[in-house]
């Protein structure tokens, strides 16, 4: 019985093993036939080494065990361009590095036309960067970054289009000249800054001197105006004092002349001649003196009479009319606009336009014109009819 059961157990174990192998093969075939593609990529499918198609994102079924897929990232990718050494047009050594942003536009071309598109684009960017820097001056390589970026991108566009790659942007990160050139540039920058500092300092000193001179000028103008006004006021005071003394003399002059005239008449009366020639002014004074003696000019209708005026010739002789005109002119000029002068002084202190300050010469000229116009249009002093000249034998 034992010998008969052994072949049956062996046969069942072999069948179980074969079933397990078949199950494993089926599972492996299923896994090999199902290809899951991510949303941001595409995959190139080859069967027995032959290109078939591009697998789109999602679940894709492919022939098992004989298919291969190659993934291509469809997002924008960043490639670092290693630091490159170049010689500029003016024989200055520089080093530069850059960043290139690319995107796969046609995965089929990227699979069939180029071995490794990333390495290809990186190597092409390195050679293009050296060529662009070597075709520019040193100052241009340091200042014209945008131009360098644009030229590199233009140079990369044509070959990368054939690979199904689009260069979206190129950015040069650093362009560094050699150490000797850097020291020379630092010295030049330092010298330029010193020059600007000296210029600014000189301009500041010049402006300070101008402001100081302007302030001195304004101070002198204010001082001159003050001295001028002081002299004018002093002269006006002297003139007013003189006129007041003249008026006082005018009030006493008539009586003094009459007294002197009577003394003269007494001297004439002691002479031997019986015929006398008397000046016209003296005859008028004698007549008025007689009235004083008789009291006829003291009161009239219960009120006191005003003193008699000199005749025209007497007034002209002693200059009473001129004194009246001088008094009128002085009264007008004495009324000075002190408030306006204070406003001008305040404007000068506040730093306003000094052109608005009145020139002393112009002010004096205006005063002379005012004096002249008042002298030309002066009023005449009325003369009493009783003072008309008379003659007596």
Image (spheres, rainbow, N blue to C red):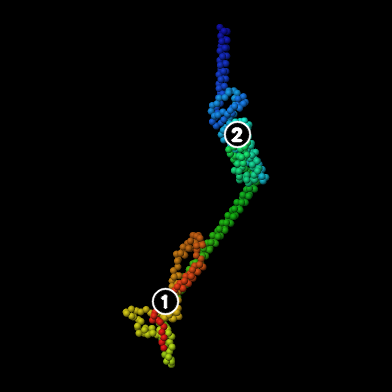
Q: Residue at x 37, y 78 (%)?
A: 306
Rendering coords of residue 162 (x, y %): 62, 34
Where residue 264 sits in the image (x, y, percent)? Answer: 43, 87
- Quadrant of res 150: top right
Residue at the image position 61 percent from the left and 35 percent from the top: 161
Tell me the quarter of the picture where residue 28 sits: top right
Sequence-wise first label, 1 or 2: 2
Relative to residue 33, is residue 180 depicted above or below?
A: below
Mark 1: few/some/many CA within 10 Å (<14, 14-19, 20+): few
The residue positioned 44% from the left and 77% from the top of the image is: 321
237, 74: nearer the viewer: 74
Q: Position of residue 224 (x, y in %)?
A: 51, 67
Circle 2 Cα neighbour tier, 10 Å, few/some/many (<14 / 14–19 / ≥20) = many
Residues under labels 1 and 2: Cα distance?
Answer: 118 Å
Instruction: Give SS at disc 1.
Output: loop
User: Taking 120 as reference, is 349 left or right?
Assistant: left
* Residue at the extreme top: 1
* Label 2: which secondary element: loop
Image location (x, y in percent) of residue 168: 58, 38
Q: With respect to residue 176, does 44 lie above or below?
A: above
Nearest the camera: 312 or 185? 312
Q: Give the residue displayed 56% in from the left and 60% down from the top.
A: 209
Q: Nearer the viewer, residue 299 or 252?
A: 299
Q: Quadrant of the N terminus?
A: top right
Q: Which residue is mark 2?
A: 164
**Residue 228 as seen in the image, left or right of residue 148:** left
The relative height of residue 106 versus residue 182 in the rendered view (above or below) is above
17 and 390: which one is in front? 390
Residue hosting label 1: 381
């Amino acid at each position: 019985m034992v010998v008969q059961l052994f072949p049956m157990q062996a046969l069942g174990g072999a069948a179980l093993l074969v079933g397990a192998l078949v199950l494993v093969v089926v599972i492996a075939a299923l896994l090999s036939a199902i290809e899951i593609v991510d949303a941001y990529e595409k995959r190139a499918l080859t069967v027995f080494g032959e290109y078939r198609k591009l697998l789109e994102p999602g679940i894709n079924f492919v022939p098992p065990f004989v298919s291969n897929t190659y993934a291509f990232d469809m997002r924008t990718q960043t490639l670092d361009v290693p630091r490159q050494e170049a010689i500029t047009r003016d024989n200055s050594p520089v080093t530069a590095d850059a960043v290139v942003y690319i995107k796969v536009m046609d995965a089929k071309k990227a699979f069939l036309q180029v071995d490794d598109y990333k390495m290809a684009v990186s190597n092409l960017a390195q050679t293009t960067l050296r060529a662009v820097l070597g075709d520019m001056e040193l100052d241009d390589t340091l200042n014209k970054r945008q131009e360098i970026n644009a030229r590199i991108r233009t140079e990369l566009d044509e070959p990368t289009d054939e690979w199904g790659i689009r260069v979206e942007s190129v950015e040069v990160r650093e362009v560094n000249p050699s150490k000797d050139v850097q020291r020379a540039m630092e010295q030049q920058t330092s010298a330029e800054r010193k020059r600007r500092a000296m210029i600014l300092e000189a301009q500041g000193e010049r402006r300070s001197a101008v402001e100081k001179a302007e302030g001195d000028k304004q101070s002198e103008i204010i001082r001159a105006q003050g001295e001028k006004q002081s002299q004018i006021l002093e002269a006006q005071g002297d003139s007013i004092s003189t006129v007041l003394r003249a008026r006082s003399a005018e009030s006493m002059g008539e009586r003094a002349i009459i007294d002197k005239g009577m003394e003269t008449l007494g001297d004439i009366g002691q002479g031997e001649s019986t015929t006398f020639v008397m000046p016209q002014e003296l005859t008028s004074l004698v007549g008025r003196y007689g009235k004083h003696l008789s009291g006829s000019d003291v009161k009239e209708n219960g009120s006191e009479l005003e003193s008699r005026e000199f005749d025209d010739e007497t007034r002209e002789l002693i200059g009473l009319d001129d004194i009246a005109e001088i008094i009128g002119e002085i009264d007008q000029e004495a009324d000075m606009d002190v408030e306006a002068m204070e406003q001008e002084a305040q404007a000068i202190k506040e730093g306003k336009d000094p052109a608005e300050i009145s020139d002393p010469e112009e002010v004096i000229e205006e005063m002379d014109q005012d004096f002249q116009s008042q002298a030309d249009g002066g009023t005449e002093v009325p003369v009493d009819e009783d003072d008309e000249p008379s003659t007596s034998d």
